[in-house]
Structure formats: C-alpha cells, structure tokens
C-alpha cells in the first residue's frame, strides 16, 4: 500500500528536494564535466566582470557585498572573486548539500560564505546572513530550476536584496522559440554531454534534466518581461561564443535609484 505524502509538504518542495538530490549525486563529477565544456568558465568570468564593472562603490575602503545565487560547487563564486578581489563579501546560496560540500572544500578568502536554501527563501536567508543590501547579485543557471509560476517572485526577491543603483546579472541557456538554437542544444546534450556523463559516472539523470529544463526555460523575451515587471531597468543582453552563440545568454539589469510603486 502506498504511503501518503504528508500534507505539509507541497509539490514544489517535493520537486525541489528531488532535484537537489539529483544534483547531490552529480556533485563529485560536476567540476570535471564543466571543464570539458568549451567556454563554460570563460562565460562565467565574462559575466562576473561585466557585473562588477558596473557596481557603484559606497566608499573606497568598503568591500563589495555580492550574492551568488545557485552557486553550485562554487565555480561562479570563483569567477566573482577573480573579478572583484579577495576582500569581496560573497554569500553563495544553493539548494544542493552535495554541491555546497564541493564548494566548501575549496580555498576561499574570509569573506566568502555558503548557505543551503532554495532561491524562493532568499528574503529569509538575507535577514539571517547579510547585514545590508548587496551591491550586486549573480545568478548562473538558476531560474530554469525554479517552477515557472514562482520565477517572477524570485526575480523580485533578487531585486529587493540589491541596493538601489545596484546590478543583477543572470546567465543561462535560452532556446525557446529559436529552432536553430534548440536543435544545436539537443545535439550537444544527447551527442556529447550525456555520453560524457556516462563515461565519468556523473549521474546522467541530471543531464537529461538539464536538456529538458533548457528546452522548457523562458525565452529571452519572457525573461525580459519578468525583469521589467520586477522594476529592473537598463537591461542589456549578451550571447556566448562558439557553440554557445545564440544559446547561452547573459542579461544585466539595474535596480533604479528610486523604485516606482
């Protein structure tokens, strides 16, 4: 006889826990597979530099405070440190305990901390772990792992945790409504990524999910609309290079100095 799921556990929580478990199982081989992805690290580095170059400084001797949302094993955190300097205060947030274990094993400056939580819990995490609004927020490959009906709320929460005048950078794969990009993405996933995940014992299930999550992810137009609904302005888009051109996109957006009601 099947046991009923406790009423207090929502479908979203169940889905999130299941997805986190899959990332946990992929964590040991995740960094290896990203090293085999041409342009992956360079794209993170380029986006991190673009974000940091736009951030206003409160004072010359005050360190930047940054969010790294969906930080995974810390690859995006490293890109932010390299762009902003060792004195930067960074809070990395991810739902996968396994990924965060890999992140914490790496050497970090004193100002780097990691917190296990879902992106939907960002306001609560901010109250407990950040003393002031951050100067900027970076989120690589995050929003497609958030249920579609909660993405507006997460984008708004990210905006709320950045000081007025600060910037947000989002990086992800977007292929919806682009037949060529969708076809290339499918060939790369099923012809390259999946076989590699089998060879290195990297939990192929998470990479099958990766393919599907990108196919179902917001189009660039849909994400643009979410940013605008959240009141973010000065939106700027950049695409990747090589095989990622037209597939990988980085968008930067600014929280206005004065929010409109």
Image (cartoon, rainbow, N blue to C red):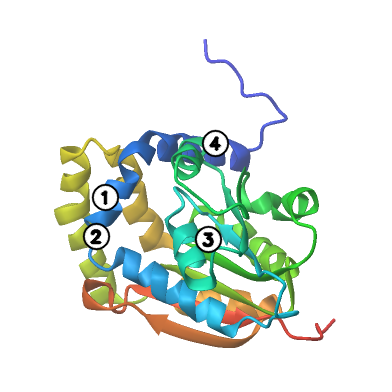
Residue receiving disc 3: 143
Relative to residue 57, is residue 44 drawn left or right?
left
Q: Are marks 3 and 1 in contact (CB under 8 Å)?
A: no
Residue denoted by label 4 = 17
Q: Count neighbours of disc 3 (C-alpha within 10 A) and say few if under 14, some if 14 to 19, many if 20 or more.
A: many
- Of 211 and 90, nearer the camera is 90
The answer to whether residue 161 is above or below residue 20 is: below
Q: Earlier in the sequence, mark 3 or mark 1?
A: 1
Identify the residue shown where x is 73% and y is 85%: 256
- Asked if residue 143 can be seen in this view, the reply is yes
Q: State yes or no: discs 1 and 4 in contact (Cβ < 8 Å).
A: no
Q: Would you identify the image quadrant in which residue 255 lies?
A: bottom right
Residue under label 1, please give it.
33
| First in sequence: mark 1 vs mark 4 | 4
Give the CA distance from mark 3 to mark 1.
Answer: 21 Å
Residue receiving disc 2: 37
Coordinates of residue 125 in the picture (x, y in percent): 73, 49
**Residue 142 versus residue 106 in the image, above or below:** below
Tell me, yes or no, whether the two marked residues, 4 and 3, touch with CB atoms within 8 Å. no
Q: Residue furthest top?
A: 1
The answer to whether marks 2 and 1 mark residues whose Cβ atoms lie closer than 8 Å is yes
Q: How many numbered discs sit on the rendered protein?
A: 4
Per the model, the C-alpha gap separating discs 4 and 3 is 16 Å
Element on which disc 1 rests = helix
CA gap between label 1 and label 4 equals 23 Å
In 3D space, how far apart are the residues under numbered discs 3 and 2 (Cα atoms)?
Answer: 21 Å
Mark closer to the observer (3, 1)? 1
């Amino acid at each position: 006889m099947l046991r009923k799921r406790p009423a207090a556990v929502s479908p979203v929580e169940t889905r999130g826990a299941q997805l986190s478990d899959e990332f946990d199982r992929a964590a040991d081989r995740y960094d290896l597979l990203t090293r085999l992805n041409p342009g992956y690290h360079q794209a993170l580095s380029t986006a991190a530099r673009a974000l940091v170059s736009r951030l206003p400084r409160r004072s010359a001797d005050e360190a930047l405070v940054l969010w790294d949302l969906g930080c995974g094993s810390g690859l995006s955190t490293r890109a932010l440190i390299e762009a902003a300097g060792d004195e930067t205060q960074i809070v990395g947030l991810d739902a996968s305990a396994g990924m965060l274990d890999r992140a914490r094993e790496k050497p970090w400056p004193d100002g780097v901390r990691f917190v296990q939580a879902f992106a939907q819990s960002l306001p609560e995490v901010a109250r407990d772990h950040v003393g002031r609004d951050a100067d900027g927020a970076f989120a690589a490959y995050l929003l497609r792992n958030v249920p579609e009906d909660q993405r507006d709320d997460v984008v708004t929460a990210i905006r709320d945790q950045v000081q007025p005048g600060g910037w947000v950078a989002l990086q992800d794969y977007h292929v919806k409504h682009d037949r060529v990009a969708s076809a290339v993405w499918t060939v790369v996933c099923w012809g390259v990524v999946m076989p590699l995940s089998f060879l290195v014992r990297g939990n192929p299930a998470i990479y099958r999910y990766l393919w599907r999550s990108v196919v179902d992810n917001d189009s660039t137009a849909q994400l643009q609309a979410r940013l605008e609904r959240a009141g973010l302005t000065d939106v700027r888009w950049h695409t990747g290079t090589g095989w990622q051109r037209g597939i990988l996109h980085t968008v930067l957006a600014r929280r206005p100095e004065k929010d409109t009601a």
